[in-house]
Image: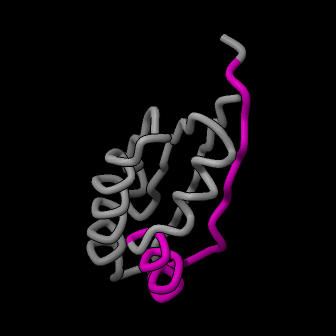
Amino acid sequence: MEINLTVIIKSKFGYREELKAVLENLAENSKKEKACLQYDLHQNIDDQNIFILHEVWKNKEGLDLHKEQPYFLKFDHTSELFLEEKIVVYVTSRIG
């Protein structure tokens, strides 16, 4: 069953570009994964310190494997340095 994620990330003041670079690397590599059906990185127009990821994964096993990849682990370990708030993750099912 497909898994949809919407992830909201807010950078600390002054760390937007560093976080953006890490997120761009994460998105680029994630799109290459076999279980990745969609991986979009967005930046809020009104508050450019807010980034939104929209991800679609083939199944839970693929998402679990994603979380073991070196680029995800790098993001997971380094992102705390750049975050203003805790990352918000919504797991959703598409209804329309």
Q: Is residue 67 above or below residue 35?
A: below
Image check: 55 left or right of 70?
right
Give the residues in magenta: 71-94
In what quadrant of the picture does the N terminus appear? top right
Q: Quadrant of the C terminus?
A: top right
Q: Position of residue 67 (x, y in %)?
A: 56, 64
The question of residue 74 being in magenta is answered with: yes
Quadrant of residue 51 in the image?
bottom left
Count of all numbered marks drawn on residues in the image: 0
Q: Identify the residue at the far bottom of this view.
A: 81
Q: Is residue 28 above or below residue 12?
A: above
**Residue 34 position within the rendered picture, expressed as x and y whole percent measured from the top left:** 42, 41
Residue 8 inside the magenta-drawn segment: no
Examine the image and state in which quarter residue 84 appears: bottom right
Task: For residue 67, say whether it is visible.
Answer: yes
Give the camera-side residue of 44 and 4: 4
Instruction: Give me the residue at 64% from left, 38% from top.
Output: 59
Q: Nearer the viewer, residue 25 or 64?
A: 64
Q: Please, is residue 50 above or below residue 59 in the view?
A: below
Q: How is the image coloured?
A: one colour
The answer to whether residue 26 is above or below residue 1 is below
